[in-house]
Image (spheres, rainbow, N blue to C red):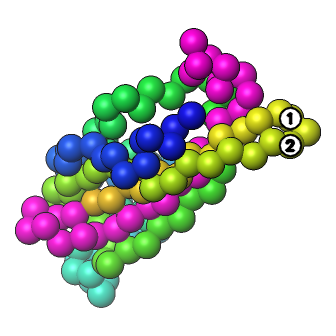
Amino acid sequence: MLKEMIGRRSEKTKNVIERGAVKKFAEAIGDASPLFTDEEAGKQSVYGRNIAPPTFPVTFDSGSIQGLDLPSKGLIHGEQKYVYTRPLYVGEEVYCWVEVKDYYERTGSFGKMGFLIVVLSGEDKEGELLFSEERVIIINEAARKEMEK
C-alpha cells in the first residue's frame, strides 16, 4: 500500500525554538526543569543557555511528503525514539524534514495493519545534524480502507 513511498522526503522547513513555546511545552509535559525556562539557570548550566525538552521536536513543522496522504482517524502512535548530537537551544533555528524509512503490513486479530516508519531530522543553519526521531505509525484496518478509496 505505501511501499512506493519508501525513500521519499519532504523539503526542509525552518523552525525557531521560541522561549514561550518551550515554556508551554515544559508545563504541558509536567517538567519543571529550570534548564528549559529559567534564563539564569540556563546561563549557569553546562550549556550556557536554555535548552528545549528532549521531545520538543514533536512540535516542529517538518513539511509534507507529496503523495503521503494519511487519514486523520485510525492512526495509532506506535513507537518513537530520539538520537541527539547535542541539545536544542532556545532561540536557535532548526531546519527539519521527514523521510519515509519503511512500510510493512501484518495481519492479526484486529485485521490487516500497516506499519509506517518515518524519520524526522533536524539540522542547524550550518547544516550540522542535531537530532533524528524515528516514529512508527500504525495504520489500522479502518484507516487502510479509507486510504484505498
Name the residue at 63% across, 56% down.
Answer: 79
As rendered, which of 55 and 127 lies closer to the eye?
127
Number of numbered discs: 2
Check residue 108 in the rendering and tell me which mark sits there, or answer none.
2
As rendered, which of 36 and 10 lies closer to the eye?
10
Q: Is residue 43 visible?
A: yes
Quarter location, residue 121: bottom left
Q: In which quarter of the image is the C terminus?
A: top right
Quarter location, residue 80: bottom right
Q: Residue furthest bottom?
A: 46
Q: Where is residue 35 in the image (x, y as percent from the top left)?
A: 37, 71
- Which residue bears the numbered disc 1? 110
In the displayed structure, 74 sits above or below 127; it is above
Report the side of 128 relative to 98 (left or right): left
Q: Where is residue 57 in the image (x, y as percent from the top left)?
A: 38, 54
Magenta stretch: give its range.
Answer: 123-149
Name the residue at 31% across, 77% down.
Answer: 86
At label 1, counting other C-alpha atoms closer than 10 Å, the crowd grade (few under 14, some 14-19, many 20 or more) is few
Q: Disc 2, disc 1: CB below 8 Å?
A: yes
The amino acid at mark 2 is Gly
Helix, strand or loop status at disc 1: loop
Name the residue at 45% across, 55% down.
Answer: 101
Check residue 94 in the rendering and tell me which mark sits there, or answer none.
none
